Amino acid sequence: MQSDSPAAEVAAVPLQDGAVLYRAAEGVAHITLNRPQVLNAINGAMHHGLLEALERAGSDDAIGVAVLRGSGRAFSAGGDLTALAAGEFTGHPAPIGRVIWNLPKPVIAAVHGYCLGQACELATICDLTVAAKSAQFGEVQINHGEQPPLPIAPFAVGLKQAKEVLLLGERFGAEFAQQLGLVNRVVDDEDLDDEVAKI
C-alpha cells in the first residue's frame, strides 16, 4: 500500500545491532526497544542504544517530542536477568533516567504488555505515560533481592503508595497504575498508537 505520508518513507535506524530502533519523522523521534524475543529485556546493547537514541533526539532541532515504545508483545520486562546472571553488563537506568529528565523535549512512553522493573522506572520518569488497558506494571526487583535502581516512584505517586509498590514487588494493571499516578492515560489496546499520535 502506498502512502503520501513522509513518516511512512522514513526507515528506522538500528542502533547497537538493532537492540533499539530510531526513526525521526514529522518532528517526532520514535525510539523502539527491539528485543521482542525476550520481551525487550534491557541488556547492555539496549542500554547504550537508548542513550544514543535520546542523544539524537535531543540534538536534532527538527525533533519536538520523543516517543518510547517496545516492539512485539511488551514495552519491556525490565532488566535482562539471564545476561545479569552471566556476568554481562546490563546497564543501569540512572543515566537513561537523567537524560530523559534533562531532555529539552517531552518524552512520551507508549506502554503495552509488560512494563516491569527498570522499564517501569523509565516509563515513570517520562514526561507523559500512555498505557494500553492490558499493560502490566510492577517494581519487581525486590522479588530478586534487588533494590529499585532509579527511585522515581516516590516523586510520582507519593511516599505511602511508592513504598507499597517498591516493597511488595507486585504486578498491577494499567488502571491501577493510573490511580497511583504512574500513568496519565489508559486506552483500549488498539487505540494506543492513535492516542500517542494525538498527544
Image (tube, helix red, strand yellow):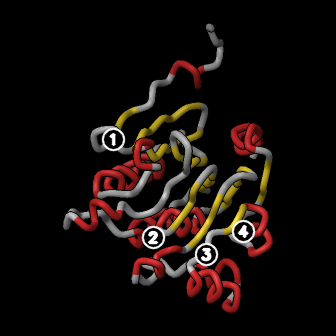
Q: Please tell me whether mark 4 or mark 2 is closer to you in this view.
A: 4
Dots 3 and 4: beta carbons under 8 Å?
A: no
Q: Which element type, helix, strand or loop, lies under badge 4? A: helix
Q: Tell me the distance, in whole angstroms, between the alpha carbons under discs 1 and 4.
A: 31 Å
Residue 61 visible here? no
Q: Which element type, helix, strand or loop, lies under badge 2? A: helix
The crowd level at tag 3 (other Cα within 10 Å; few <14, some 14-19, many 20+) is: some
Q: Quadrant of residue 145?
A: bottom left
Q: Is residue 37 above or below residue 9?
A: below
Drawn side of residue 137 relative to residue 84, left or right: right
Residue 170 image label: 3
State which tag comes first along the sequence, 1 or 3.
Answer: 1
Q: Tell me the distance, in whole angstroms, between the alpha carbons under discs 1 and 3.
A: 32 Å
Residue 98 image label: 2
The residue wearing badge 1 is 15
State which tag comes first along the sequence, 3 or 4.
Answer: 3
Q: Please tell me whether mark 1 or mark 4 is closer to you in this view.
A: 4
Dots 1 and 4: beta carbons under 8 Å?
A: no
Residue 79 visible here? yes
The crowd level at tag 2 (other Cα within 10 Å; few <14, some 14-19, many 20+) is: few
Q: Which element type, helix, strand or loop, lies under badge 1? A: strand
Q: What residue type is labelled 4?
A: Ala
